[in-house]
Image (cartoon, coloured by chain):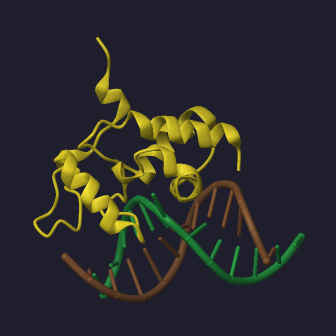
Chain colours: A yellow, B green, C brown
Amino acid sequence: MDEEYVEAVLSLVERIPPGRVMAYGTIAEVVGSSLERGGPRLVGAVLSSYGAAVPWWRVVTASGRLPPGSEVRARRELAAEGCPMSADGGRVDVRHAAWHPDADHPT
DNA sequence: ACCTTGACCTTGG
DNA sequence: CCCAAGGCCAAGG
């Protein structure tokens, strides 16, 4: 696993504002556009192994599902941040919570 | 070098 | 809305 790629992913995840989320695939696109490699699955692998120190719960699947195995934890964190969720709280309302670094463009 | 696995994504039933 | 199939890229056995 490339140190460079891992760092790129982790630093991006750290930039996701509280209450907002980013999909694995979106991260793969952003990071991949500069490093020219990787895909959604690789992003997942990175967070799974090295994501403990970053707000990994702000990364969800394209359909708003929470990371398998850590759903309870993620759900609690997101709720505390006021992230828009489905009524049952099992999924994130991606339509309203999705965040993209370019959209956060500085003035 | 080949095959299997995985915190994925999209499309079709 | 849920489930299954194919495509995807890289890591591990």
**Picture mark count:** 0
Visible in this render: residue A64? Answer: no
Task: Decide if residue A12 is on the left or right side of residue A83.
Answer: right
Identified at 39% across, 66% down, the residue is A70
Visible in this render: residue A4? Answer: yes
Rendered-image quadrant of the C terminus of chain A: top left
Residue A74 pos. (x, y %): 32, 59
Residue that sits furthest to the top in the current view: A107
Identified at 59% across, 57% down, the residue is A49
| Picture quadrant where residue A6 is located | top right
Residue A57 lies, with reference to residue A10, above or below; the image says below
Residue A3 pos. (x, y %): 69, 41
Residue A1 pos. (x, y %): 71, 50
Residue A103 lies, with reference to residue C5, above or below; the image says above
Residue A80 pos. (x, y %): 20, 50
Identified at 28% across, 54% down, the residue is A77
Residue A106 lies, with reference to residue A50, above or below; the image says above
Taking depth in this image into account, of A53 and A12 the one nearest to the observer is: A53
| Picture quadrant where residue A73 is located | bottom left
Taking depth in this image into account, of C10 and A36 the one nearest to the observer is: C10
Task: Decide if residue A80 is on the left or right side of residue A7.
Answer: left
Identified at 54% across, 59% down, the residue is A48
Task: Decide if residue A36 is on the left or right side of residue A20.
Answer: right
